[in-house]
Image: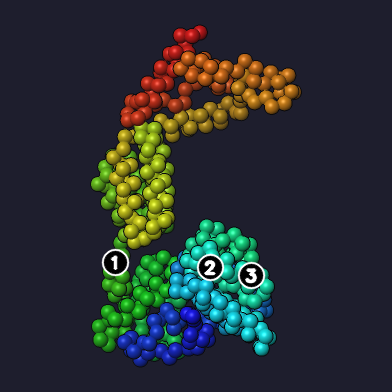
Amino acid sequence: MNDLFDTGPAQKTKAPSSPSQAQHPLADRMRPAALDELVGQENLVGPNKPLRRQIETDQVPSLILWGPPGTGKTTLARVIAHHTKSNFHALSAVLTGVKDLKEVIDLAKRGQRFEGKKAILFVDEIHRWNKAQQDALLPHIEDGTITLIGATTENPSFEVIGPLLSRTKVYVLQPLTEEQLSRIVRRALEDKDRGLGALKLKIDDEALAFIAATSDGDARRALNTLEICLTLLPKNEPRITKNAAEQALQKKSLLYDKSGEEHYNLISAFIKSMRGSDPDAAVYWLARMLEAGEEPLFLARRMVIFASEDVGNADPQAIQVAVSAMQAFDFVGMPEGWIPLAQAATYLASAPKSNASYMAYLNAKADIEREGYLPAPLAIRNAPTPLMKDLQYGKGYKYPHDFEGHVVDQDYLPEKLKGRRYYEPTSIGYEAEIKKRLEDARKATKERK
């Protein structure tokens, strides 16, 4: 059986006198063992929050912790292990299965019988267990043999079976903020028992900000970067500089503020390059933003919008490409997720362009604002009740499929807007065919009058 916490949840490792003497990774040594040491997730474990009260009163229910890597799922389980009066058992779903679960259940039953203690089972990456393995948990949760704490980076709605979800409470953990990551790094530098305090290191503000900004809300990644920085420092150098942090990540800090002016400058350049049918510029600006740490799904969403706004029906497949790229990134993630994004950007930039459907909506919206909410013609209203039929709803409606070419002369707009045109297809790409089809349909209906 694999025990994630063999060293004990509250055990402290003495700080190494030099980086090479560390026996455990810094991220593991700095893992909080008590509620008051936790950084982040205040919505769950802040003062008077439900989960905190449950931990403090030893009334933790079966639960699923869902969140990105490095946000504190295992840490929360470890804190519960420290605070609870229950026997604590841990399994990794990557390395264990039903056989290991049976061993835990036997231990849990012996603990209840001979010690009068409840048992908590922590299953890391529970989404890795198949249906049969997850099913094996159910009777033991149901009869109170174990309290389950599952951790997952995947949406439990899709990866955890329904019966198990119905017996657990799902808590969502959020990525840590840059300010929280900075606090964690500083704590590691100051902590003399578990961290690097004995080394009396300093860190430049720019280096600290860079590590926090490039860690994507992941505390483990931030501490791993800090540890790598130590190996790059010249002998007897007590200060971590931004250059050392960049070397640790093998990544330069590009001029980019995700919430400032440069953010808007670069996304504008990206969109306008695609609109201008320049795939080379489009992929350059895409790379600039991704390499500087822009949120990839933000860029994917912008391409989905662009596909309808600027390509439209000139190439109806464009939106399929954009949506598929967004879904592909969501499925693959980084570091390879840039590949479908680059494909979508170059496709959209190379596609024929039309904003006719985009302008059609804006023009229709302008008429609504100007004319108000005009009633639909009686002939095309729905008439599900006798009263509506008496009021002439649906009277005179012409069913297009009963006519040649499946088109018929009929008013679909309000009387006040009769003859108004909103969608004016261009002669570019597939829209040229749409334009011809509409012209032929209008001509046919006029000839039948």
Q: Please tell me whether mark 1 sits on a helix, a strand or a loop.
A: loop
Mark 3 Cα-neighbour bin, 10 Å: few <14, some 14–19, many ≥20: few
Answer with mark 1 or mark 2, whichever residue precedes in sequence.
2
- Left/right of residue 352 with respect to residue 57 in the rendered view: left
> In the image, which is nearer the foreground, mark 1 or mark 2?
2
**C-alpha distance separating marks 1 and 2:** 41 Å
Q: Please tell me whether mark 2 sits on a helix, a strand or a loop.
A: helix
Say which residue label 1 marks: 251
Image height of 363 relative to 241, above or below: above
Mark 1 Cα-neighbour bin, 10 Å: few <14, some 14–19, many ≥20: few
Q: Amino acid at mark 3?
A: Pro
Tell me the tag on residue 420: none
**Residue 225 image position (x, y, % from top left):** 35, 74
**Residue 277 image position (x, y, % from top left):** 28, 39
Tell me the tag on residue 133: 2
Mark 2 Cα-neighbour bin, 10 Å: few <14, some 14–19, many ≥20: some
Q: Quadrant of residue 416?
A: top right
Image height of 253 relative to 337, above or below: below
Q: Residue at x 67, y 85 (%)?
A: 113
**Residue 124 image position (x, y, % from top left):** 50, 72
**C-alpha distance separating marks 2 and 3:** 12 Å
Say which residue label 3 marks: 139
- Left/right of residue 194 with respect to residue 210 in the rendered view: right
Q: Amino acid at mark 2?
A: Gln
Q: Residue at x 50, y 64 (%)?
A: 130
Answer with mark 2 or mark 3, whichever residue precedes in sequence.
2
Q: Residue at x 36, y 28 (%)?
A: 431
**C-alpha distance separating marks 1 and 3:** 50 Å
Q: Residue at x 59, y 72 (%)?
A: 148
Image height of 317 relative to 340, above or below: above
Q: Amino acid at mark 1?
A: Lys
